[in-house]
Amino acid sequence: MTNKAYRKMFFLSLLFVAFITQVALCDNIDPNNDGSKYAYGENVGWLNFEPSQGPGVHVYSDRVEGYVWAENIGWINLWPASYGGVLNDGAGNLSGHAWGENVGWINFSPDFGGVTIVADGDFDGWAWGENIGWINFDSVDLYGYNVKVCVANFVDVGNFVDQWLQIGPGWPADLYSDEEVNFKDYSILASWWLGYCPDDWPLKD
C-alpha cells in the first residue's frame, strides 16, 4: 500500500467515528461555483438561490433560511415571520412554506410533490405555489441546472489528505488558519462530516 493510500485509509477510519457525532449547521449554495443555484417555474422562470445581490440562501439541519431572487416575481422569503418557513427534517426532506410578496405562499411539501435534498447536496422534486404553479428542482428536467448545497464528503477528504502536513500560507486544508495542515484542521473537517458546510468552505476549491 502506498503512503498516500495509507493516509486516506487512516482519515476515512477517523471520519467514520466522527460521523456518529456530527451536528450539521449552516451551508453554502453552489459550493463548486458551477451555477448549481437554480430552480425553475414554468410560469415564473428561473429562481436564483445565490443571487449576486442580497443575502441568498442558507441550509441548516432543521430549516432553510434566506431569500431567493426571481427576475419575474422578485424576492421569495424562505423564513417569513409568519407561517413557519421552510423546515428540514435533518434527512433532507423539506416542508413548510416560503412567501413571495408578489406571488403569495409556496409549499415545499405539497400533495403529489415535495422538495428533498439528497446525500450529495442536490435539491430534487417540486414545490407548489397556488398563484404560480409548480417549481421544478429536478436537474434532469432542467438540463443540469439545479440547486446544490455544500456537503462535507469524500471529495473534501481527498483534498485534505493531499495537503496533509503542508506548512505555509494559502493551503485550503488549513481550516484552523495557523499555516499548518494538521490534526487541528482535521478536527474541524470531522466536525462537519456529512453535514452542510459553512459558507466559503475551502475544500471544494
Image (tube, rainbow, N blue to C red):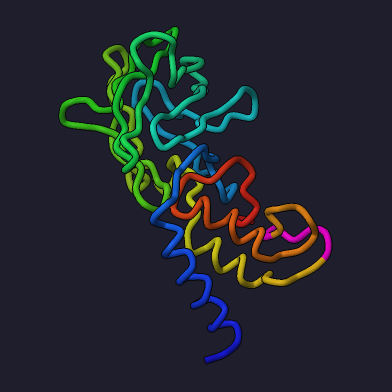
Examine the rendered structure and indicate whether residue 139 appears above or below residue 52: below
What residue do we see at 43% from left, 63% from top?
Answer: 17
Q: Is residue 49 magenta?
A: no
Point out the residue furthest to the bottom here: 1
What residue do we see at 40% from left, 46% from top?
Answer: 122
How many marks overall?
A: 0
Image position of 119 (left or right of 152): left
Image position of 22 (left or right of 182): left
x and y percentages locating residue 45 in the rendered image: 42, 26
What residue do we see at 37% from left, 45% from top?
Answer: 139
Quarter placement of the C terminus: bottom right
Q: Is residue 170 magenta?
A: yes
Image position of 89 (left or right of 65): left
Point out the residue furthest to the left here: 112
Q: Main secondary structure of the magenta part?
A: loop
What residue range appears in magenta?
A: 168-173
x and y percentages locating residue 98 in the rendered image: 38, 18
Identify which residue, 42 or 15, lies in the foreground: 15
Identify which residue, 47 or 20, lies in the foreground: 20
x and y percentages locating residue 123 in the rendered image: 38, 41
